Image (spheres, helix red, strand yellow):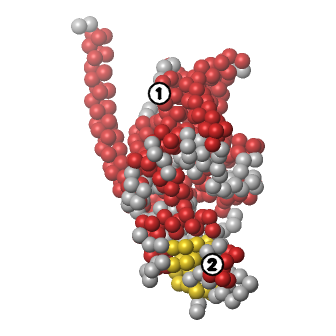
Amino acid sequence: MPKEGLAVTELSARRLALASPVQGQLVAAVVFLVAAGLALRVLLAGGDLWLDEIVSVDHVRTLTSIDQVFWKINHDNNHFLTSAYLYLVDPLAPAVVQRGLSIAMGTACIVAAVWATAGRGFATQIVTGFLFTISYVMVHFGSEARGYIGVVLFTLLAVRIVEERMDSGGRGLALGAIVFLGCLSHLTMIASVFTLGVWVFGIMVWRERQFVRPVFDALNVFTPAIIAVLLVAFGMIISIRLLGFGLGGYAPFDFTSFVLGFGGLVRTTLGLLNPIGSWDNWIAVGIAPIAALTAVWFYRDRRIALYSLGIVAWPIVALIMRLPNLGFPRYFIVSGVFLLLLVGELLGRALSKGSIARSGAAIVLIALLLSNGWAMLRLFEQGRGVYEPLVARMTEMGPATYATNHEPRTEIVVNYFAGKLGRHVELIAADQWCQRRPQWFILELQPDSPERLEPTRQCHLSYQRVAATVPQGLSGIDWALYRRSE
């Protein structure tokens, strides 16, 4: 063998020998993170279902075949993949079973995060996987029977697939399938497609130094994704035209609500569960884009540019379009994905530098572990609300009557748990309170509920508070249970 060939062979062997231990360490670390992430999600999937989950369960109860999930439930609470899973399980199964699909997807997000950051360095992969293991937002939605964690999973997969397709072509079927499944998880997947599309277009403009050709090149990359989005949209439009559409709730655009939603997402992604004051959401909204732009300016790296764009792109679109319901952090979950990717990248780079940078990164990681751990402990203790024991208390002496300040919502939850317990309860409408004198009253959405309650001035009707539940985190509804004073 020529000396040159021998030298190349020896060099390849040395690289393989060096890579093998690192690869083994990566696999071992991922196995540990997956085990820890699965345990956290199973642990926090206990407790009662809350309103939105129960609505999904009630929807699938009326179906006679699984295909009806995709065309018969025309409601914004229908997250297709989750509804299909709920159709397959017992509607009265333990909560951890009904949340099983989200637990599986949430755990898979850890592997997907490591896979998406391949080539970014060993430390970056491990740190990013760690962040997706412990981030409160990821654990919360990874243990709840809703579709948002599916958006996280398919966004992570799309990041790497899009980059590979942009650089070397191919992977079109994979991209189309990922986007299709993401949209079936929840339509906020469109925010991921938009972000990745803008990023690809920007990269191609940078390469070509013009604007016309990059438009067609970007469209070529995203044709499978566009087809996937159009397929879902076309199916929904036909179904809506035939059967109509229902909304669980509608809140018009309000800038303060936007701050509450986006700022709340930034906070809880980093483990800051409860607001410190009235100003912390505003600070989060300000710091997030500033930090993202600073990272882009400092590193001039296309992946960091993607992560930074992902943090701010959807919120900017939501502001410009004045979208409704922006007070819910979950609608900005795509920004949370890119926020964790950016933090993982920056901390991974810091761990690969000198001792001062490594020490700083270690302190940040410990702080994130503690803050997210505390947030998860609060969720474990109080859950998304404790409703079944309250319904059991109402009906422990037999059939019961009750009233509430939120009739449609409260009735859904009460009926679900009454059915699960095999009990009978009757909701008394407000115009019959004086005549029927309900035995119980459920007061919603007032965490500081009074000890005594007189819900009407039409007659003497007084109630004494006997129990209350204040859910933690991003889901659930406050309940205070009152018994009529004789």
Residue ID at (40%, 60%): 92
Please give the count of numbered marks on the rendered protein. 2
Find residue 54 and report its horizontal and vertical position in percent.
51, 59
Eyeballing the image, is 331 above or below 232?
A: below
Residue ID at (63%, 22%): 219
Eyeballing the image, is 403 above or below 250?
A: below
Find residue 96 and report its horizontal and vertical position in percent.
39, 58
55 relative position to 91: left or right: right
Eyeballing the image, is 224 above or below 269?
A: above
Find residue 427 and report its horizontal and vertical position in percent.
58, 72
Residue 195: which quarter of the image? top right
Query: What's the residue type where badge 1 is placed?
Result: Ala
Residue in the foreground of this view, choosing between 227 and 353: 227
Residue annotated with mark 1: 174
Image mark for residue 43: none
Find residue 309 and report its horizontal and vertical position in percent.
63, 39
Judge the density around disc 1: few (<14), some (14-19), many (≥20) Cα neighbours within 10 Å. Answer: some
Distance between the Cα atoms at labels 2 and 1?
Answer: 50 Å
Image mark for residue 448: 2
Quarter of the figure that contains the C terminus: bottom right
Task: Note whether residue 72 is visible.
Answer: yes
Query: What's the residue type where badge 2 is placed?
Result: Asp
